[in-house]
Image (cartoon, rainbow, N blue to C red):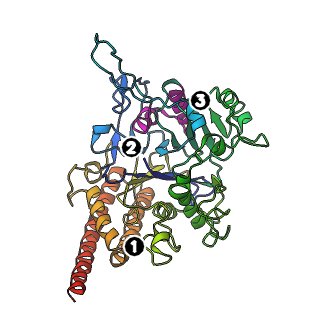
Amino acid sequence: MACTTILVGKKASFDGSTIIARNEDCPSGEFCEKCMDVNRPDPAKKTYKSVLGHLEVALPEGGTRYTCMPNADLKEGLWEAAGVNERNVAVNATETLTSNERVLAADPLVAYRAAKGEPGEDGYETEVAGGIGEEDMVTLVLPYATSARDGVLRLGALLERYGTYEMNGIAFADVDEIWWLETVGGHHWIARRVPDDCYVTMPNQLGLDSFDLEDAFGEGREHLCSADLREFIEDNHLDLSLDGQLNPRDAFGSHSDADHVYNTPRAWDIQRFLNPSAGPWETAAPHEEFGPESDRLPWARVPERKITMEDVKYALSLHFQGTVYDPYGRMGTPATRGMYRPIGINRNCQLTAQQIRPYVDGPRRAVQWIALGSNAFNALVPFYTQVDEVPEYVRSTPKTCTTESFYWANRLIGAMADASFAATQPHVERYQEKLQAAATRLILQADAAGADMAETNQAIADETRRQTDELLGHVLFARSNEMRNGFKRSDN
């Protein structure tokens, strides 16, 4: 599934927080209904069975309560996407990645295979379970993780034992560290600690551009990996470096033409926003070092200034503003405006950013920011995570479209505003600024007063609903005016 991820180290963020954030995007032509919820593992439940992979996994004891962003329609499983547990450990999963033929030949993905025929018949083949995937990872790891590093090791052990049917990148955070794990084939994985003074950009392609095997098999301070990764690389001749310095992007990643259209330009768009002085972003030719198809964009970069939550939201809503590639813009030509896949797109279904704050006491330390629908037209609002439930307005999403639903209201705004961008954008920008300011103010007041977190979350939900309904009215009015004016022009 298409996604875009940004990770912000504690020395790169505006307030010393660790921040992990990701868009979850729907497949083309689909609406993936999402909601926010709080889940507490049932001590009586000893196993988990996936819907897509038909895999049964034994559950450990000691699972804690956690927030999550599950699918509203459970036909394909929970897909809990992102959350924070009682220990203030966050997981955001997953960023779908791409690999290459040599890796997949050496360690094939573990795909589910349905039974063929009936028992006792000639040629009968039993069902073969698949590995774990995006559907399962938050559910299997987040309730039990004691730290970001522990989350990496827990997921790594599951991957080594059960395998996976897809290539994925997964973010883990606690108050001190952020880790990024990438799957490599069916059973192998690598993980790096995000440098504290850097941010990381991840579109849908394998991103790690360096890896220290000596550290991974030694102290493991900045690098971790599957137990036999060194032998896996050597036996299958996967290291393509000339100097012996392993580059995972070359060894394990894809090298397709599609990456240059669908993936790389999204990393380019974020990096030109956060490091505008680094190079000639807008004037570089596509394949040059600072061009949108460059293969040399770094995985991690030191920003030119500290990164705020507003920056995170803007970065995950980018659509190549100020360039000839902006599909809503007037620069360039129709061909250039549709050349690359933007980050903020009408297929965004939810954005979650988890902020783990070092200057606030334990119960209030973690804030989960969410936005539903297309990021070009929605707003990011925060919720405390150490609560037993979240407000009904964000918890319940029906399968049918209604303005009574926060999810569907955002979908409707996006559908209308996308078709009338110029007419509706002033209303959208005012809404985004007003709502994020009002919701953030409620968090600041609750922090200072030690107010009830559930009541604060409800107040945020109420303010969100009020302002979203107001925006819906503005967008509907602007859209109807534009359509009416269009009819008048056509009559003339």
Q: Which circle's residue, 3 or 2, is located before the other in the chain?
A: 2
- Label 1 and label 2: CA atoms lie apart by 29 Å
Q: Look at mark 3 in the image and give the residue it sits on.
A: 106
Q: Which part of the image, by quadrant, shows the C terminus?
A: bottom left
Image spot of residue 92 (x, y percent) = 47, 45
Magenta residues span 132-160
* For residue 210, above or below residue 199: above
Secondary structure under tag 3 reads helix
Image spot of residue 187 (x, y percent) = 54, 29
The answer to which quarter of the image holds residue 459 is bottom left
Farthest-out residue, top: 120
Q: Look at mark 1 in the image and give the residue it sits on.
A: 429
Q: Residue at x 27, y 77 (%)?
A: 478
Q: Look at mark 2 in the image and give the residue it sits on.
A: 67
Q: Which circle's residue, 1 or 3, is located before the other in the chain?
A: 3
Image spot of residue 361 (x, y percent) = 50, 48
Magenta: predominant secondary structure element?
helix
Q: Nearer the viewer, mark 1 or mark 2?
A: 1
Q: Nearer the viewer, residue 75 or 152?
A: 75
The answer to which quarter of the image holds residue 101 is top right
Q: Residue at x 55, y 48 (%)?
A: 205
Secondary structure under tag 1 reads helix
- Check disc 2: other Cα within 10 Å, few if <14, some if 14-19, many if 20+: many
Amino acid beneath label 2: Thr
